[in-house]
């Protein structure tokens, strides 16, 4: 909700009127004010200025927060952020397309605004970190023309694509990142930098017929995009080899019209920051020239990217008739070289109330008695309502306001400003959530991302040479995807190679129709498998051995499962009003997957059977918030909660998070680890025993015999893969009647296997929170220059670095070497052999940003959450396990900045095959949400021997992980007394032209994906959804695709009535297996004369339909399918009732 009315109330009197007059003068002003008023000051100056306002911050994070805050105070303001490059101008790594596109969008709009497009309209305020003012630009950037399209415009699609490629967009198969475009038939997909969703432009001939937003997650359209497409350029010629002569440079401030105002948000902080940027840039350049003198590449011309100092930028701005103003918490400054006229707002920073609402009420009562105007800005509607109830309960007049401020009461607005302030001379008090409870809400205007519709990994991403498992024929090798035409019927097939039937002969090949792709899975199982023979009995024997072996595992799992189902757990009550308040106060927007997981957990908790659920979500995807809500729910019924984490550091971090989230509520949270004194531990143990401690967060110290709970209701295990067998055995004793919630970023394969077979429920979080970018991952030989460059780059953006060195003996020597390489950085060392309190202090100091680089052992692997650390350097990465590498990488990239991960191995030492596999995997799986894929790959590399015992790993190696899991599922069903759910192969061999033409979907991977989904279709609703998706993503389809969809429908019908074979044999069509009662056979013969029933082999043969009775040909394609559908409806009328 906008605070426009509060803004108007504040700025209508002195000294604000003086600011409005001062803008018209030539003088330079300093406004004395706390930073919390900066968005109001910027809005006020913009409103009264003839030019554009340039609001300058010290770093990118402040710029992002300011952009959001400006819109809160004035919803009609046109604000744009001009980001700095994430990289140094001399580096080979280019900034992301998103950063470049957003920069060029601002430049274009400043010089050539276009009010026909919302994205291109005149800007009122540009927000920029100081670094982006200091970097020179090419003068020609404003002339890079965007592609602008509205519905009804005419343009040749090929011409449009050529234009987009010319201005820096990358053509790909499927649009997933900003700066991507994809073309399919008459459809153009484009992800414009700065946009939340990509756009889909549909052409009819050369005319733009429709433009709509679509979701990256499932590629489906969302809604019409009313503002059309305005796509700015996505590359800066600077980054190209062929840039212009160096004289053609200008500063960013040169682009602003006369009488524009440059406004520095915190002048002293910005000056310091500018000096650091200059110093670091010079040091980096010196290092680059040193490298060049030793034979490295010569850096690009110094003048090309040399940052200008702030004084030069200021002089240049004043020369161009721009005004240079400052906001500072200080009235005067000893370093001032020029005389500023000072306007003092006489504003005061608020002392926080730290959750003490009694103190808040006392303060408000006092101010109301003095006739002050009072505003509380609350981030959520739920907390606003709670404030209203609490104030009313204290007999204070209050209301939730939407427009005007009223006198003699507390006005509550729903708006998430970061900090409040008081203006004593104006008698105005503004209080934020942060001031009341000490929690910082998210300053980002986030809308929800779409969930991934299919929560599974597409393991059928096949490359030639991959091993596959066909359920009927066994292990083979994928060769290619090919088309075959017989008569007029074209079908696509997967070619699978099997072992030769006789020695010395060529390998056998099996052509698998694409409508049978559900029979194929990629082989995952450790060793390279041996190929089976087609038609041999060895595959059935192999499956038989595996079936026999899994019975034993199934029996053990069933015992555990039955004990849980039979035991009476506690059924928790539905959500309380307090639960809703807690959830409303969450500082971020939940992703849909997060909400689905939370709902799953709550439903399980409300059942009387004990919960045993795994939450699998990549590192940083919001699993902790699920634990916060589940634990809170348990405490509402008077139950205690134990949260088990693998390290003492994680205890501290979770304790801080839980304490902060629960601060407004009477819930007692305590930590239990080595960090507590004996006295604290004894007090905590007593509290656990008498029930006064509600939530206990601890390491495996929680599993010792002296920890006795009064009424334990929920156990949460974080990072399950870090606990050993003995700890898990101890937990098993609790598991029968207490609710269990397990969280893991890389589920250990046993967990994965159990959850896949339904023993433990599994929820997966696959949607990345907010705007998280994948971590840019580099794998290579160790290079000191690269290490120094990586650290310096991070320091340039106020970030911090994790340097992982896993040998305590040499960690001091390595740190000393790093200190020599980057003398300006502050280093700290952390490892497990340090005194606990000393270790805790180092970590907390690093968290508080007292150090720039933390050199540590793998202590960073376990859940250390430091959002400001966005560069990771791992020394000797070849000696780590895959799961460890993934966990360590998850420590960076948790904020909004792009994160970098460097995995180095020794130059002089050759890699082992397994180490190479691990590093190759970590380099490939950089996408967000790749934890599950890494878990499967981990299983593949290590095999499953140490998880299920050597005997079981042998069976997995023979049949592959997927089929093994399916066999366990079947054995479990039998052990439970259920009919095992076996999807039999459905063989449809008819004269049908059914395929996806290459001119409809060109990319093989996408065709295979659609074939696979059609083969797995379970009902007509799912099939209709795929049909809609094809129209949406690829445009109108022709008869071959229509027939493909019709075959999928026929498979659904066949599965319903138990038919697994529909085969055309000359002029008859065979249906099997089929056993019909006499009444139906009579009916069949009457409707289809000449039908033969073969009871012994359970099949019927029906004369195929002909085009004419005399010399007619067998019907083909849609007509033949319509005939079969009609036959099914006649013969199986009862079974297919209600089927469309």
Image: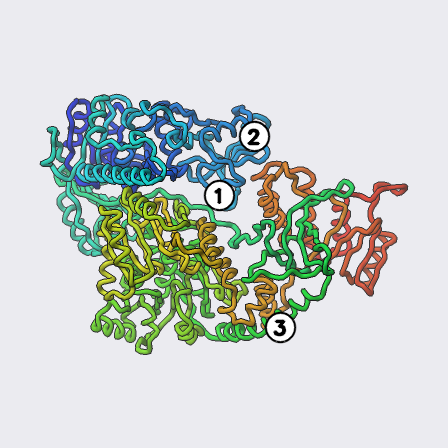
Q: Marks 2 and 3: in contact by CB < 8 Å?
A: no
Quadrant housing the N terminus: top left
Q: How far apart are marks 3 and 1 (CA)?
A: 44 Å
The numbered dot on residue 561 is none
| Badge number at residue 203 | 2
Could you tell me residue 487's position as x and y percent?
Answer: 78, 41
In this figure, what is the number of numbered marks?
3
Residue 1021 in view:
no
Tag of residue 216: 1
Q: Residues within 10 Å of mark 3 (few under 14, many from 20)?
A: few
Residue extending furthest toward the bottom: 705
**Which image quadrant is residue 114 in?**
top left
Name the spot of residue 305 as percent of width and height, x first.
31, 32
Q: How far apart are marks 3 and 2 (CA)?
A: 58 Å
Q: Residues within 10 Å of mark 2 (few under 14, many from 20)?
A: many
Give coordinates of residue 702: x percent, y percent.
Answer: 33, 72
Element type where label 2 sits in the image: strand
Sequence order check, earlier mark of 2 and 1:
2
Q: Which residue is drawn at 17% across and 47% down?
A: 350
Residue 467 x, y percent position in the rendering: 60, 56
Can residue 30 be seen from the camera position used here?
Answer: yes
Q: Name the residue under label 3.
A: 548
Camera-side mark, 3 or 2:
3
Q: Farthest residue toward the right? A: 1110
Residue 233 vs residue 1107: left or right? left
**Pointer 3 or 1: first along the chain:** 1
Q: Nearer the viewer, residue 819 or 714?
A: 819
Instruction: Give the residue drawn at x 38%, y 54%.
Output: 906
First in sequence, mark 3 or 2: give its number.
Answer: 2
């Amino acid at each position: 909700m906008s605070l426009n009315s509060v803004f108007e109330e504040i700025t209508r009197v002195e000294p604000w009127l003086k600011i409005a007059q001062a803008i018209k003068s030539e003088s330079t002003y300093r406004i004395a004010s706390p930073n919390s008023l900066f968005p109001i000051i910027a809005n006020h100056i913009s409103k009264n200025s003839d030019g554009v306002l340039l609001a300058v911050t010290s770093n990118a994070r402040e710029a992002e927060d300011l952009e959001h805050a400006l819109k809160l105070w004035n919803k009609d303001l046109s604000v744009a952020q001009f980001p700095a490059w994430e990289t140094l101008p001399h580096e080979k790594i280019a900034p992301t397309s998103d950063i470049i596109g957003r920069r060029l969008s601002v430049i274009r709009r400043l010089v050539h605004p276009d009010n026909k497009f919302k994205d291109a309209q005149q800007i009122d305020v540009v927000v920029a970190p100081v670094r982006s003012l200091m970097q020179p630009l090419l003068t020609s950037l404003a002339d890079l023309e965007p592609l602008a399209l509205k519905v009804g415009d005419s343009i040749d699609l090929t011409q449009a694509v050529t234009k987009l490629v010319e201005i820096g967009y990358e053509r790909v198969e499927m649009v997933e990142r900003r700066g991507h475009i994809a073309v399919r038939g008459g459809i153009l997909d484009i992800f414009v930098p700065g946009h939340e969703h990509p756009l889909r432009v549909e052409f009819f001939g050369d005319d733009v017929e429709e433009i709509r937003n679509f979701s990256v997650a499932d590629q489906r359209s969302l809604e019409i995009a009313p503002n059309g497409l305005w796509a700015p350029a996505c590359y800066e010629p600077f980054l190209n080899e062929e840039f212009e002569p160096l004289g053609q440079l200008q500063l960013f401030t040169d682009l602003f019209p006369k009488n524009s105002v440059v406004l520095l948000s915190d002048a002293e902080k910005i000056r310091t920051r500018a000096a650091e940027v200059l110093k670091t840039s010079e040091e980096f350049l010196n290092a680059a020239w040193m490298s060049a003198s030793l034979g490295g590449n010569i850096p690009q011309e110094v003048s090309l990217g040399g940052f200008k100092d702030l004084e030069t930028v200021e002089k240049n701005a004043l020369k161009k008739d721009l005004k240079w103003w400052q906001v500072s918490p200080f009235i005067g400054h000893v370093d001032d070289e020029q005389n500023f006229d000072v306007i003092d707002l006489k504003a005061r920073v608020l002392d926080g109330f730290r959750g003490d609402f009694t103190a808040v009420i006392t303060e408000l009562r006092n101010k109301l008695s003095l006739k002050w105007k009072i505003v509380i800005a609350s981030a959520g509607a739920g907390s606003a309502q709670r404030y209203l109830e609490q104030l009313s309960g204290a007999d204070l007049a209050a209301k939730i306001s939407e427009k005007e401020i009223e006198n003699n009461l507390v006005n509550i607005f729903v708006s998430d400003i970061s900090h409040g302030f008081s203006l004593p001379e104006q008698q105005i008090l503004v209080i934020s959530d942060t001031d009341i409870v000490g929690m910082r809400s998210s300053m980002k205007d986030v809308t929800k991302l779409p969930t991934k519709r299919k929560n599974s990994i597409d393991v059928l991403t096949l490359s030639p040479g991959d091993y596959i498992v066909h359920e009927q024929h066994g292990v083979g090798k994928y060769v290619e995807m090919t088309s075959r035409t017989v008569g007029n019927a074209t079908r696509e097939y997967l070619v699978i190679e099997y072992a030769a039937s006789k020695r010395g002969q060529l390998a056998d090949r099996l052509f698998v129709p694409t409508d049978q792709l559900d029979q194929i899975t990629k082989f995952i199982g450790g060793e390279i498998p041996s190929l089976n023979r087609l038609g041999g009995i060895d595959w059935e024997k192999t499956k038989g051995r595996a079936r026999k072996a899994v019975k034993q595992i199934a029996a053990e799992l069933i015992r555990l499962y039955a004990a849980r189902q039979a035991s009476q757990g506690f059924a928790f009550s539905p959500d309380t009003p307090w639960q809703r308040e807690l959830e409303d106060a969450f500082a971020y927007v939940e992703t849909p997957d997060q909400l689905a997981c939370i709902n799953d957990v709550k439903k399980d908790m409300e059942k009387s059977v004990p919960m045993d659920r795994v939450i699998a979500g990549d590192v940083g995807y919001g699993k902790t918030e699920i634990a916060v809500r589940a634990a809170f729910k348990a405490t509402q019924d008077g139950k205690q909660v134990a949260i088990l984490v693998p390290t003492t550091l994680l205890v501290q971090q979770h304790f801080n998070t839980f304490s902060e989230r629960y601060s407004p509520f009477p819930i007692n949270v305590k930590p239990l680890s080595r960090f507590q004194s004996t006295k604290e531990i004894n007090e905590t143990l007593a509290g656990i025993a008498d029930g006064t401690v509600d939530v206990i967060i601890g390491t495996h110290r929680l599993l010792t015999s002296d920890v006795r709970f009064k009424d334990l209701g929920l156990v949460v295990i974080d990072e399950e893969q870090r606990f050993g067998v003995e700890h898990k055995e101890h937990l098993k004793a609790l598991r029968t009647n207490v609710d269990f919630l397990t969280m893991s970023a890389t589920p250990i394969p046993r967990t994965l296997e159990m959850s896949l077979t339904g023993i433990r429920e599994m929820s997966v979080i696959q949607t990345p929170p907010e705007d998280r970018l994948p971590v840019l991952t580099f794998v290579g030989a160790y290079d000191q220059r690269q290490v120094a460059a990586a650290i310096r780059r991070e320091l340039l953006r106020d970030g911090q670095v994790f340097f992982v060195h896993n040998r305590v003996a040499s960690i001091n020597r390595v740190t000393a070497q790093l200190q020599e390489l980057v003398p300006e950085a502050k280093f700290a060392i952390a490892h497990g052999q340090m005194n606990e309190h000393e270790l805790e202090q180092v970590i907390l100091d690093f968290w508080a940003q007292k150090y720039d680089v933390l050199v540590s052992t793998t202590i960073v692997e376990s859940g250390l959450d430091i959002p400001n650390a966005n560069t990771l350097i791992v020394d000797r990465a070849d000696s780590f396990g895959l799961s460890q590498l993934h966990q360590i990488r998850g420590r960076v990239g948790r904020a909004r900045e792009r994160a970098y991960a460097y995995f180095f191995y020794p130059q002089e030492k050759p890699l082992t095959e397994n180490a190479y596999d691990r590093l190759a995997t970590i380099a490939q799986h950089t996408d967000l949400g790749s934890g599950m894929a890494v878990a499967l790959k981990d299983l593949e590399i290590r095999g499953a021997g140490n998880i299920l015992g050597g005997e079981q790993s042998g069976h997995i190696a023979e049949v592959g992980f997927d089929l093994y899991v399916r066999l366990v599922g079947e054995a479990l069903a039998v052990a439970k007394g259920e009919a095992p759910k076996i999807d039999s192969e459905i063989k449809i061999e008819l004269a049908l032209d059914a395929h996806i033409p290459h001119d409809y979907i060109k990319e093989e991977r996408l065709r295979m994906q659609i074939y696979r989904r059609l083969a797995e279709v379970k009902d007509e609703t799912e099939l209709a959804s795929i049909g809609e998706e094809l129209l949406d993503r690829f445009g109108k389809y022709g008869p071959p695709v229509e027939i493909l969809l019709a075959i999928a429908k026929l498979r659904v019908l066949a599965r319903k009535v138990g038919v697994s074979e529909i085969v055309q044999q000359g002029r008859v069509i065979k249906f099997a297996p089929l056993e019909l009662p006499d009444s139906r056979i009579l009916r069949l013969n009457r409707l289809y004369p000449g039908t033969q029933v073969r009871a012994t082999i359970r099949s019927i043969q029906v004369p195929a339909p002909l085009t004419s009775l005399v010399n007619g040909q067998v019907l083909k394609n849609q007509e033949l399918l319509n005939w079969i559908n009609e036959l099914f409806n006649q013969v199986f009328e009862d079974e297919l009732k209600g089927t469309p």
